[in-house]
Amino acid sequence: MKGSRRLHMLLFAITLAALVSAPLALPERALAQFQTQTNAGALVLRALQVLEETYVDPVETVPLLNQALAAARHVNGAEVSTDQVPDLPSGLAPSEARRQFLERFGQIAAANRSVPEIQLAHAAIRAITGTFKDSHTGFLSPEQYRERIRRQRGEPGFSGIGIVLMARDGAFYVREVVPNSPAEQAGLRALDRIIRVDGKTTHGITADQISGMIRGPSGTEVVVTVQRAGAPEPLSFPIVRAPISIPSARSQMLAPDIGYVRLYQFDMGTANLVRSAVASVLDAGAQMLILDLRGNPGGFLHELNRVVEIFLPRGIPAYGLRQRGQGLVVMRTQGDPAVPPTMPLVVLVDESSASAAELLASAIQEQRRGAVIGMKTAGAVEASILVPLPDGSALSVTIARMYSGRGARLEGVGVAPDQEVQISTVDLERGQDSQLAAAIRVVRDRSVRRVLPTGLVIGLRPAAVLVP
């Protein structure tokens, strides 16, 4: 995507953002000056301008500014009535609407001096982006923006112990232990149930609360107590927090003939790492392959382009996109696949597989190249850019509608697996990854059935996962 900001197009789900050619944030001194000397209402108007110029569909100025006023009236429970500060009348010219908005925003700030104006502005911007109701348009605080940029660059995005949580029936389990993390070094395992953090029970708390308990400054210690399948008593692990970098991909052999590639996210350099991971399992003797996209939130579109080509033949329609005022453009693979076309392939997805991960799973499914196993994906599939704002915050803005290679809309719909498999609480308590076990069964079934008695090799699906 070309433009004056030289922003990169990407696919972005609730937890990742684009890398842009702009500073991460204003220096602290400059940020403080902005917050104290600038009318924060101008920040809201800047956010509106970004949306007007870049959002995939035309936007209406007055309704959005009224949403901003409504949010600012109720920050921190403060009540500024519409009698005190009325909405903007419909039919105003954009320039007059902006002038009146600044006047009304100033009135709200004056009536609620206990709340910093920048906080009112952030609430107003969140309200504006919330009206679009799509997965890729939203507001990021300065802290969230800095973390997203670091993660997208492959740098540590936060300090913690290096686990991915899974919530089931009010309990929290370790879905994934980040390779080479403090959690892995301490001995935590996938599917451990976290029952206490620093002696405090995890019963009845939210995912954000337990995440906040586990995260902390680098070099500090946290004690995580888990119940492990097969262990008679809970196990406690003192773990020293450290900066956490989530890898793009890793690989291993699940059996002498089954290769496994875990794709965590589509950040810078992902395609090269996936290609290396595939080569590693092929060199180790893999005859079948499982590609795990569970929990993958997406990332850069140009990395998706190269990853699709690892699995699908040249000339295949991978996905389509439509930008503002333009028709549908179908993107096709341009290279030769690294995975042999006859190798049995199974793709694992779940409710947290989003964006680029959904498009990859959809392309493999539509081309009948592999079976998709797990749960329906997130349905968060658009193309967006991340635009920094003057106070160090940022906007994620949808700039293109995304489609599958055959033209299906996935936003709000997701990719339905060929075979639905959910990890139940019973599975977790037994320490069993039922989705991975199903993938192993299916990929072995495909391996048995791909060779006909005549010796011809084809890519048949097992009967249990045939797609009409």
Image: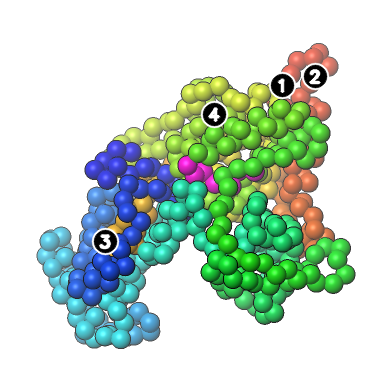
Q: Earlier in the sequence, mark 2 or mark 3?
A: 3
Circles 2 and 1: CB atoms closer than 8 Å: yes
Q: Helix, strand or loop at disc 1?
A: loop
The magenta segment is 262-268
Number of other residues with Cα within 10 Å of mark 1, as a class: few under 14, some 14 to 19, many 20 or more: some
Of the pair 37 and 16, the residue shown nearer to us: 37
Distance of label 2 from label 1 (alpha carbons): 8 Å
In the rendering, which numbered label is found on residue 390? 3
**Which residue is tagged 2?**
452
**Which residue is tagged 1?**
458
Q: Magenta stretch containing residue 264, yes or no?
A: yes
- Is there any visible trace of residue 128 in the rendered image? no
Q: Helix, strand or loop at disc 4?
A: helix
In the rendered structure, which amino acid carries the disc numbered 4?
Answer: Glu
- Whether residue 232 sits left or right of residue 286 in the image: it is right
Q: Residue 313's x, y, as percent?
A: 57, 23
Of the pair 150 and 436, the residue shown nearer to us: 150
In the rendered structure, which amino acid carries the disc numbered 1?
Answer: Ile
Distance of label 4 from label 3 (alpha carbons): 39 Å
Q: Residue 234's x, y, as percent?
A: 80, 72
Circles 1 and 3: CB atoms closer than 8 Å: no
**Which residue is tagged 4?**
309
- In the image, which is nearer the foreground, mark 4 or mark 3? 3
Number of other residues with Cα within 10 Å of mark 2, as a class: few under 14, some 14 to 19, many 20 or more: few
- In the image, which is nearer the foreground, mark 2 or mark 3? 3
Number of other residues with Cα within 10 Å of mark 4, as a class: few under 14, some 14 to 19, many 20 or more: many
- Whether residue 197 sits left or right of residue 131 in the image: it is right
Q: Where 450 falls versus 397 (above or below)?
A: above
Q: Earlier in the sequence, mark 4 or mark 3?
A: 4
